[in-house]
Amino acid sequence: MSLTPQVLLSINLPSCRTLRNDASPARNEIKDRLLRELENNDFAACWIVHDQRLENTAEIAQLSDASQEVSVYLNVTTSPNQRAALSTQLTNLTERSRKLGVRVTTLSTNQKIDEGNLNLLVRNRMSMVNQYCGIQKTLRSIKSLEPSSLRFGIWEVPAPLQWTKQISNPVGELILKSAMRFQSKRPFQHIQIDIQSILNNKTSVNKIARLLRSLNRMREQGKIEVTPIRSAAIVLRQLQFKQSNHIPAA
């Protein structure tokens, strides 16, 4: 199966409740700017929402012609009983999202889901698990990995290319590195924009805008596809069927 390289685009959106009062306007300004840039380039991204009340979620999902994806971040590390915590939070998430008319199929969290608890994701119709929410604390960038199959129908999202850590790097360098990776057999790359790390930094916001335009040019040239995380599940199901349930190792 011939596959155009897929860029999985995600945006990590912090909750206003966790920010200083003076940081909320900057957060909202960046959110609105990114929505405009996505619209201008006809891109859909996966917005990782850290507010389980899902405030602004319907706005993000519905105000764009290119339907934006919403993923909700669940913190399950503080509970000794992961299954109970995950079950409760998933039930609440499903009820809230249904009332808003927003479908959530990508779960974002801060640790691996125990294998015995993956059936909870199936029950709540999750297909992708994203463990990478925000800039990592390590100084070195995380290598881009292939999606891994957690169980039939559920995949782990590949680690993102952490580029906002090095604000001085030109966007062109990122695109060059991306193009080099696309020449390999690995068909997926995850680019994540972390809003909290770029609050009050107009330079990095402008670079992100240029990044999106560069990705759009690559897409128009037929070199890549730019999609939200949920779209990877469709491609992965096709690959899994074609390759007899085998996904190449990273």
Image: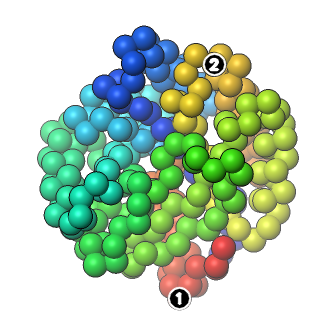
Q: Report the side of 153 relative to 193 (left or right).
A: left
Q: Amino acid at mark 1?
A: Ser
Q: Quadrant of the N terminus?
A: bottom right
Q: Quadrant of the C terminus?
A: bottom right
Q: Quadrant of residue 114?
A: bottom left
Q: Is residue 5 above or below residue 14?
A: below
Going 59% across and 26% down the picture, which residue do you hit? 198
The residue tagged 2 is: 201
Mark 1 vs mark 2: give the one in front. 2
Q: Report the side of 112 relative to 140 (left or right).
A: left
Query: Please, which residue is most extreme toward the bottom here?
Result: 244
Q: Is residue 204 above or below residue 222?
A: above
The residue tagged 1 is: 244
Task: Please tell me which of labels 1 and 2 falls first in the chain.
Answer: 2
Callout 1 crowding tier (Cα within 10 Å): few <14, some 14–19, many ≥20: few
Percent x, y for residue 133? 48, 47
Q: Amino acid at mark 2?
A: Asn
Going 68% across and 25% down the picture, which residue do you hit? 204
